[in-house]
Image (spheres, rainbow, N blue to C red):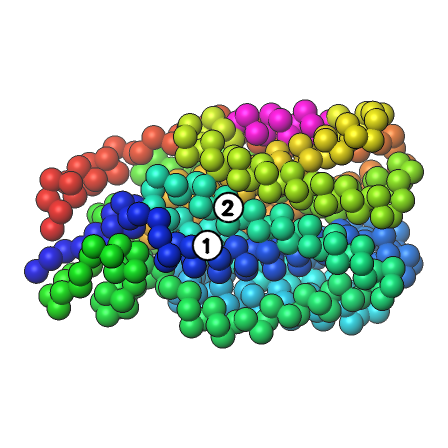
Amino acid sequence: MRQIDVQKLCDEARFGKFHVLLLFWCALIIIFDGYDLAVVGIALPSIMKDMGVQATSAGFMVSSALLGMMIGAVFLGTIADRIGRVPAIVICLLLFSVFTAAAGLTHDPVMFGIARFLAGLGIGGVMPNVVAQMTEYSPRRIRSTMVTVMFSGYSVGGMLAALVGKAMIERYGWQSVFIAAGVPALLAPVILKYMPESLAFLVRNKRAESLKEILPRIDPSYVPQQADGFSLSDREAAPGSTITRLFADGRGLSTVMLWIAFFMCLFMVYALSSWLTKLMANAGHSLGSALTFVLVLNFGAMIGAIGGGWLADRFNIKHVLIAMYALAAISISLLGVKVPVGVLFFLVGLAGASTIGTQIVTYAFAGQFYPTAIRSTGIGWASGIGRSGAILAPIVIGLLVSRALPLQQNFIAIAIPGVIAMLAVCLINVRRPRQDAIAVARAEADPA
């Protein structure tokens, strides 16, 4: 009887058609997710005018979705390790598509906030699941690149929201860009049918036939045999609560530092996503020009994500993250300085690369930090805890905007978390614990 280590097979596989299709589906989901996330920031000035709300109230309206994202990331990230990753992804897709569209049918801040909270459950829950999915199936040598290329769809979604906003808001009203977000729900049955399930889930549930169907698509040299058995390495298959295992084997301090990095980075991301349009409008730019800044922000994010992933596969991903967080603090601080418009566009793109792009690389880092069996849980908890930073950001910056402080002070408030995140990443221990090394050594000495 052969014993097949499914994760090792994935790690050593050559990049092929299977990976292209998986990348396509995951990136498409992230594009939809990014659109739903960015659409509020795009429409915020119009929503504030239509509903007659002030900056502080608008901050709470935006944060309602972020509260949902925090709960969704923790709950739907954790539950995916139990019910299967694909059903969890489909549930998330339906939540954020249907309820973002529903938000466009509301007429008061309370109902809008409720709809966005429910959409936020899906927006937050889908992220840890698709990151875990791509991390699990990607060949080891290009894993960071695969995850960050996939997650660059987040920036594509943000740019799509800005383009749709420029084309539709002034003509059809802010509601139109929300209603358009309901279209992806139609793809739920297709994703449920064609996306492969998590290997760790299939191994734990002894679904050998499904594994025999998937593994040859990953590595054509593998020919299934009737008596084949399937396993993960010892350290990944160890018993115990998935949540408590986030702190096991010397991961405790690093898990907390990862949570802090997520918190600070998401604070920067959502502060810019929610208030960049309004801040630029307050600085004298027209609505169309302010939306162009959002396009540049997301284009920079895409470059930062792909470039950061490329660097992470060639250098130490921890050192890449430290440099990117430092760049975030510097570039955001400079946004409040009076400079020529061309230089300002460059700084906005740099801020996108070093905030949204850095967050994507941080997801890739978290996906590699945790073992396969607790990967969705680990990413989900880091993302969920980090969402409290995303919730606070629109409220804190909204309070600053309402006080009519100088532009420079608003951007410095957004930049400070970049310094804190950089210090937190410095304290993360990326070396495998001694128990992990022993388990791997045993597996290599006795593959069966």
SS at circle 1 = helix
- The residue depicted at 91 percent of the width and 38 percent of the height is 284
Q: Closer to the camera, 354 or 256?
A: 354
Q: Quadrant of the N terminus?
A: bottom left
Q: Amino acid at mark 1?
A: Leu
SS at circle 2 = helix
Q: Which residues are magenta?
A: 322-333
Q: Is residue 103 above or below residue 222?
A: below
Does label 1 or label 2 sit earlier along the sequence? 1
Image mark count? 2
Q: Closer to the camera, 412 or 245?
A: 412
Question: Neighbour class for label 2 at 10 Å: few (<14), some, many (≥20)?
Answer: many
Q: Amino acid at mark 2?
A: Val
Q: Is residue 190 above or below residue 34?
A: below
| Residue 349 position within the rendered picture, expressed as x and y whole percent measured from the top left | 69, 35
Say which quarter of the image contains residue 81: bottom left
Q: Closer to the camera, 402 or 324?
A: 324
Q: Are marks 1 and 2 in contact (CB under 8 Å)?
A: yes
Q: Is residue 356 left or right of residue 376?
A: right
Residue 149's disc is 2
| Residue 297 position within the rendered picture, expressed as x and y whole percent measured from the top left | 70, 40
Q: Is residue 379 left or right of residue 59?
A: left
- The residue depicted at 77 percent of the width and 41 percent of the height is 293
Residue 23's disc is 1
Say which quarter of the image contains residue 272: top right
Q: Closer to the camera, 173 or 417?
A: 173
Q: Look at the image and say whether residue 325 sits in the magenta stretch.
A: yes
